[in-house]
Amino acid sequence: MCHAGFICLLPVLPLAMLAENMTTTGETPLPPPSYKILRFDEDYSCLTNPANRSDWFDPVKYIPLRENEPYWYLSFGGELRERFEGIHDDNFGIGSGPDSYWLQRVTLLGDLHLGERVRVFAEGISGAIAGETQPAPPVQDDPIDLQFAFVDVLPYLTSDERLTLRAGRFGMSFGSGRLVATRAAPNIPFKFDGFEILYARPLWEATAFLTRPVKDSGGFDLEDHSTAFWGLYLTHWLDAPHKLGIDLYYLGVAREHGRYASGAGNEHRHSLGAREFGAWDHWDWNAEEVLQVGSFGTDSILAWTASLDAGYTWDATFQPRLSPKHHRRSPKCRGQFDSNRVRQRGGGCLLAVFKKRCCLRCARFRGHPCAENRFSLCGRRP
């Protein structure tokens, strides 16, 4: 029987504090930082300057903890997402009828900054589903869980360089999200337990990580000890506005007792990839190439994929865009997608490790690869 429930969130803002903390000066306030899919990527340090505290939520986003030390502060945030989905004849009308349900996601977060070199972040999450006629998978139905919790330490920090050491539970999203993304569509996104090293300077960013994915259990989730995920992702921008650049990366996955229709065995996959992206005048482009090698049991793995997404946008009402796309991949993976195809040909198909296109209608089925096996494709393109 499907568990249905909603968690209501009624945030109470200290309205009296809002007017008191509004500061009027002769300076022009900076625009607030934009919201990110990974909320811990948001930076509210601009609020250390009282002239920038012009928004009603600033007293919640910036709570100073020490007098005369503006970088000692606490920030709160959250999200309430409501979504309705209806499906008819999702299996071409064979053995299934119409289905509709309501999805809800609630998150609450706290971000503690102990100066410029130490940070503690935590985010709780609740995902609920109502009206579903089939048993809901854990990625949709998880009443309460710890989504993120980590500590950042910055041993090296200058005006234009920073090195961050991160330990705990966090999310990751690289490039355009073809291989590693947040899985933002279902109620519960991806999360990882482990370590990260992040380096940034004006035209460079590098991330090295060693993690284990967290299992989706429908309760307080624990890491999957049978799976390890590690890698290095490097980005170099060729211009100051960060519109033109190149990504180079390596991703490694090891699974004990990986299961496919053809059998089970230890699985090791190594992905080497490059991405070229940019925007110039009215043109934009995003190309990516990946080579994947490794082993599954006694069989070897060799797979590849290449894709190009380019477009031209007109300066007109609604900004119409013409966007031709082209995609190629290993011959063994061509043809109409079948939910068992990846499992049957684990050595010939490139597996999109933690991709973003695990759609809502796929994740609702327990038997679908997106609900059971993070490493399977959910669609025809990696």
Image: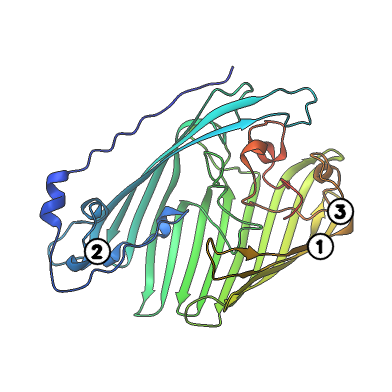
**361 shown above or below 49:** above
Q: Say which label, 2 or 1, has the lower sequence index.
A: 2
User: Is residue 115 in sight in this rendering?
Assistant: no
User: Is disc 2 placed on a helix, strand or loop?
Assistant: helix
Residue denoted by label 1: 328
The amino acid beneath tag 1 is Arg
Residue occupying the point 34% across, 33% down: 9
Q: Position of residue 351 (x, y in %)?
A: 74, 53
| Side (left or right) of 348 relative to 205 | right
Spatial CA span between label 3 and label 2 = 52 Å
| Side (left or right) of 180 relative to 77 | right
Quarter holding residue 310: bottom right
Q: Residues within 10 Å of mark 2 (few under 14, many from 20)?
A: many
Q: Position of residue 378 (x, y in %)?
A: 71, 45
Q: Say which label, 3 or 2, has the lower sequence index.
A: 2
Residue denoted by label 2: 47
Residue occupying the point 37% across, 52% down: 121
**236 shown above or below 63:** below
Residue extending farthest to the top is 1
Spatial CA span between label 2 and label 1 = 47 Å
Q: Say which label, 3 or 1, has the lower sequence index.
A: 1
User: Is disc 3 placed on a helix, strand or loop?
Assistant: loop
Residue occupying the point 33% across, 48% down: 77
